[in-house]
Image (spheres, rainbow, N blue to C red):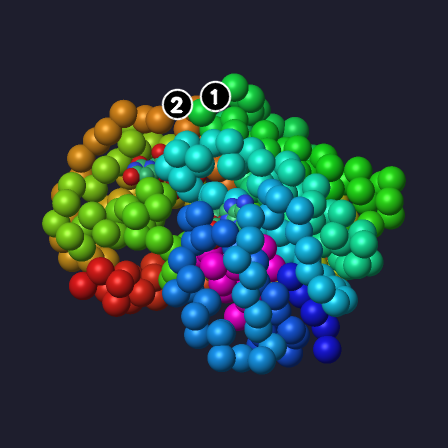
Amino acid sequence: MKRVLITGAAGFLGSHLCDRFIAEGMHVIGMDNLITGDIRNIEHLFPLERFEFHHHDVSKFVHVAGELDYILHFASPASPIDYLKIPIQTLKVGSLGTHNLLGLARAKNARILVASTSEVYGDPLVHPQTEDYWGNVNPIGPRGVYDEAKRFQEAITMAYHTYHQLETRIVRIFNTYGPRMRVDDGRALPAFFSQAMLDQEITVFGKGQQTRSFCYVDDLVEGIFRLLMSNYAMPVNIGNPDEISILDFAKEVVQMVGKGSIGYRPLPKDDPQQRQPNISLAKEILDWEPKVSRAEGMAKTYEYFKKVLL
Ligand code: NAD
Ligand code: UDP
C-alpha cells in the first residue's frame, strides 16, 4: 500500500487532499500544528486504520517512521489576514519547513509536491499569467512574507531536484474555494458569504475593480493528483481562468444569498490588481481543465456555510 504524508492536513486544501488519497486506497499521514487549520476538517478520517494524524510544527525537524512514497507540503497560512498576523511563522514554514520536508523526501526516497501560489507572480505585469513569467513582487511589503517564502520554496525545491535528483513537483495554485474554508479567514469568498448571511455590510476593498479567478476545490485536487503522478518537475499553474472583478463577485454572492448590501473599504497595500491563470501547460501535460462552474461551486459552498453559520 502506498504511503503519503500530507502537511497542512487540517486546513482547507489539506483536508480535501487527505480525502482524495484515502479514496485512492493509500495510507495517509496527516500532519498539522493547527495554527490556521481546524481538526474538525479531518475528524471523519480518525476511525480509519489507513489514516493517522501527527500534531507537529513542520518548521521543526520532521520525523515519520516507516516508508513514504509521496509527500505533499501544504502547511502554510494562506489567507492575507492570517499571514499578516503570523508573518514569521509564514516565512519559516515556507523556508525551514520546506527544507525539512525535502530532507525527509530524500531520506525516504519519496516524491514530493509543494504548494506554491499565484502570489509568486505578485502584482503581475503579464496577463494572464504563464509559468515563464518571473513576477512582480515587493519583497519588503506586507505580502512579501508569504510571496517570498513561496518563491524561496520553489527555489530550494528546484535545487533539490537538480543537485540531488529528487523527484519534485511544484503546483502554482490560483484562488481556490469550497467547503471547509474558515468563515473568518478574511478571504473574499468566506467574508462575503458570511457578511451577507449575517446581515453585515459586505466589505469590498478599493473600488472592487481588481480581479480574481476562482477555482472549485474538487477541480484543484484533481489537477494536483495528476501533477503528482506525472513526470513533470517544472512549476504548473492550476486554477480556473474564469476571471471576475471583486465587485461583480460580491454582487453574485448577494444574488445567491438573496440579501446583502455592499460597502467599500481601503484597498490593502500591494493587493494584486489582476489575476488569471493561463492553464495551457496543465491542459497539455496533464490533460486537465476545471469542470465546475462558479455558479455550481458557489452553490455547494453556500450549503456548507449554511451548516456552519445558521
Ligand atoms: P489553510 O490555512 O486552511 O491550511 C493550512 C494548514 O497548514 C492549516 O491547517 C495550518 O494549521 C497548517 N500549518 C500552518 N503552518 C504550519 C506549520 N508550521 N506546521 C504544521 N502545520 C502548519 O490554507 P489552505 O487554503 O488550505 O492552503 C493550503 C496550502 O495551499 C498553503 O500552502 C497555501 O499557501 C497554498 N495555496 C492555497 C491557495 C488557496 O486559494 N486556498 C492558493 C494558493 C496556494
Ligand atoms: N477582498 C475584499 N474584501 C474582503 C476580502 C478581500 O474586497 O473582505 C479583496 C482583496 O482585496 C483581493 C480579493 O478580494 O483583491 C481577493 O482577496 P483574498 O484575500 O480572497 O485573496 P488574495 O488577495 O490572496 O487573492
x then y, percent, for residue 106:
80, 52
158 within the magenta span: no
| First-in-chain label (1 vs 2) | 1
Tell me if residue 127 can be seen: no
In the displayed structure, 71 sits above or below 45; it is: above
Residue at the (24%, 29%) spot, across then down: 265
> Label 2 near label 1: C-beta < 8 Å?
yes
Residue drawn at (18%, 35%) of the image: 263
Q: Give whichever of 249, 9 is nearer the camera.
A: 9
Which mark identifies residue 269? 2
Q: Is residue 258 left or right of residue 14?
A: left
Relative to 309, does residue 250 appear above or below in the rendering? Answer: above
User: Of helix, strand and loop, which one carries label 1?
Assistant: loop
Check disc 1: other Cα within 10 Å, few if <14, some if 14-19, many if 20+.
few
Give the crowd class for mark 2: few <14, some 14-19, many >=20 residues within 10 Å.
Answer: few
User: Residue flagged by tag 2: what amino acid is it?
Assistant: Lys
Question: Residue at the location (29% across, 32% down)?
Answer: 205
Counting from the top left corner in percent of width and height, residue 220 is at: 54, 58
Residue at the spot of label 1: 141
Q: Amino acid at mark 1?
A: Gly
Q: Is residue 245 left or right of residue 63?
A: left
In the rendered structure, which segment of residues is drawn in magenta?
6-19
From the viewer's side, name the closer residue of 49 and 26: 49
Q: Quadrant of ligand 2?
A: top left
Spatial separation of the CA atoms under disc 1 and disc 2: 8 Å
Is 10 in the magenta? yes
